[in-house]
Amino acid sequence: MGSYHYSALDDLLRGGGGGLGGSLSSAAVLLRADLNITPGTDHLRLKAHGETLRRLREAGAKIGILSHFGRPRGARVPSLSLAPVAPLLADCLGYKVAFAEDCVGETAESAMAALSDGGVLLMENTRFHAGEEENSPSFARALARLGSFYVNDAFSAAHRAHASTESLPRLLPCCAGAAMEAEMSALGGFLEGARRPSMAIVGGAKISDKIRILRHLAKRVDSLFVGGAMAHGFFEARAYPIGRSRAEPDAARLARSVEAAAAKARCRLIIPRDVIVAASLNESRSRAVSASAIPSDMMALDIGPETVAELGLLLDKTRTVLWNGPLGAFEHGFAEGTMAIARHIADRTRSAGLISLAGGGETATALRRARLDGAFSHLSMAGGALLEWLSGARLPALAALEENRLSLGKESRRRSL
């Protein structure tokens, strides 16, 4: 992973000698947040920014929140307005949140000017402007006119080289917010300073989507378990019949490349030894079979009890675990394997001090359904950014923060990924 040297929120608030901290009173601060919420998220993304907002408000800053919502692709799409999110954010945080019908221009500038010290303004979807996703310098300059400082608290958008994430921090004194810092502390510690033995559990549908992640993790962890439909490529690589199970055309070749990377790194690669099969996703009748003997008229839809037991024993010896992606078709009712492993990790976290990190939208959904989203050491709501980070890629938003650190009279704290 790359190493980032960027300023943290404390640097902005303290001001490297005390001066700047006091000057935040009445200062306009642009906060890049992730309010791209979906139904059933329990507002976790809204709550994630609470600490950053609290500290900025206590310092007397006037806070303008920038966020995207959905994929309007440069058009003003009413159904993708952030207007309904403002009252949700207010209810979640317990104070008034004003709303501006644009994020640049006179409308936004007037709304920012009307804020009192400690006031919070949510501005309209940045993606209503084509310049956002185009990373337009002129659009970034229009955003910069709204504030004196920039705080990025949206790790989940850190992989996007957009105007509000990559260009804006190059125009204003900038730092990472508390939520961003928490992500970096948890995730950075996993690959660079994890307590050993370490383990990664990776599930999902397409091995092609996560091939770089699997190869990279194989070099970093002691054990790597591959589940979900991705495991079917490994079955094919071993000449196991997969019946009607889902598998990409090139899955076996990709699986072999992961096996080679794991062997070279002396990482223990584990795939399911048994699976739950059914005739279709809608079939209530199912049974466990060996992974090497999937019937021709069946499809594998979950990990089986022998695999759950094997993973449990391995987790009992593990000190750090990272989990990304469900281990079966949990959204179609084949969730027992995923839930069993989630419960085991949560129990070991509570009782044995296991350091447990989970991330990705589907993973977070599975943990919420199991009421275990608060039982892991760290739960990341990031999707694409987390996957990019796990693959070893450098994230544009973090690189931008690094290149324009706050000049506060002291060296910024080092953050290693």
Image (cartoon, rainbow, N blue to C red):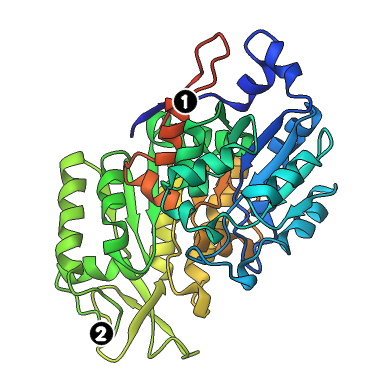
**Residue at the extreme front of the image, as rendered:** 106
Is residue 2 visible in this depiction of the protein?
A: yes
Which amino acid, by three-letter code, is at mark 1? Asn
Q: Pointer 2: residues within 10 angstroms few (<14), some, or many (20+)?
A: some
What residue sits 50% from the left and 73% below the top?
330
Three-letter amino acid code at the position of disc 2: Gly
Seen at 64% across and 71% down, the residue is 78
- Quadrant that contains the N terminus: top left
In the rendered view, tell whether residue 176 sits above or below residue 83: above
Instruction: Identify the residue position indicated by label 1 in the image.
Output: 404
Packing grade of label 1 (10 A; few <14, some 14-19, many >=20) is some
Q: Are marks 2 and 1 in contact (CB under 8 Å)?
A: no
Kindly identify which residue carries mark 2.
243
Of the residues tagged 2 and 1, which is closer to the observer? 1
- The structure residue drawn at horizontal position 70% and vertical position 51%, both measured from the top left corner, is 107
Q: Nearer the viewer, residue 226 or 407?
A: 407
User: Residue 213, image x and y in percent?
Assistant: 31, 50
Pinpoint residue 267: horizontal percent, then vertical percent: 25, 43
Rendered residue at 56%/43% (across/down): 142
| Frontmost residue, 180 versus 286 | 180
User: Which percent across, then down, holds residue 45?
Assistant: 64, 53
Q: Quadrant of residue 406?
A: top right
